[in-house]
Image (tube, helix red, strand yellow):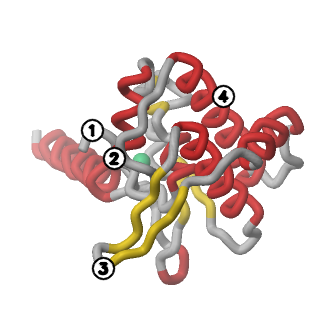
Amino acid sequence: MRFAFVSGDPALDLTATVLSRRADPVDTLTTPADLEQWVAECAELPDHVTAGATDLASALALREALYRLALDRLRSRPFHSGSLAIVNDTAAGPVPTLRLSDDGLRASGDFRAVLTRLARRGITVLADRGACLKECGRPDCTRLYLDRSRGSRRTWCGMDECGNRVKAAAYRARRRARATAAD
Ligand SMILES: [Zn+2]
């Protein structure tokens, strides 16, 4: 797996394909092939979807609109109207076909169906006033996620991604402090 899916929702996972948004943004979706790979790795989306340059542009527009709306939610301010229009228009497109079997759920559809699904998931999350939307506690990370833990005490987007890194950095800092004190 090249991409992380730790936000608790595919629409939020999409927004997290730009890493370190504040300090030093890195876009991990720069080619249609990147996008195809992301879709293939996302459990809820159709397999074997092909994407072109126009699809990439649509996906990035949806991603930034979802991110802007999620920030609006996080900061308790009204939704940005241009971003609302992008997400709502995308959500009105064709949806993937879902089939149930003993192997579980299988989604199929083309790239437009992928975007529709992502927009609809985003709407569901952002409309849910009870959803505990958070930004990762590691300042450089900036990943948004849903905290579904008991008591909503989760601090990091994921232990592998950030929790362990923060703990390791704190441990190194403590060791340095002890070494300095012993000098
Ligand atoms: Zn994080």
Residue 27 or 154: which is nearer the viewer? 27
How crowded is the residue under tag 4: few (<14 C-alpha within 10 Å), some, or many (20+)? Answer: some
How crowded is the residue under tag 3: few (<14 C-alpha within 10 Å), some, or many (20+)? Answer: few
Residue wearing tag 3: 102
Dot placed on the residue nearer the N-terminal end, 3 or 2: 2
- Point out which mark residue 100 bears: none
Query: Marks 3/2: CA distance?
Result: 21 Å
Q: Is 151 situated left or right of 106 in this image?
A: right
Residue wearing tag 2: 41
Q: Is residue 60 above or below residue 131?
A: above
Residue wearing tag 1: 2
- Which of labels 3 and 4 is toward the front? 3
Please state which amino acid type lies under the numbered disc 3.
Asp
Marks 4 and 1: in contact by CB < 8 Å?
A: no
Q: Is residue 28 above or below residue 161?
A: above
Residue drawn at 49 percent across, 48 percent down:
13
Q: Position of residue 135 (x, y in %)?
A: 56, 51
Please state which amino acid type lies under the numbered disc 4.
Ala
Query: Marks 1/2: CA distance?
Result: 8 Å
Query: Marks 1/4: CA distance?
Result: 22 Å
In the rendered image, the quadrant that contains the N terminus is: top left
- Point out which mark residue 61 bears: 4
SS for dot 3: loop
Q: Is mark 1 within 8 Å of ligand 1?
A: no
Q: Is 11 situated left or right of 160 in this image?
A: right
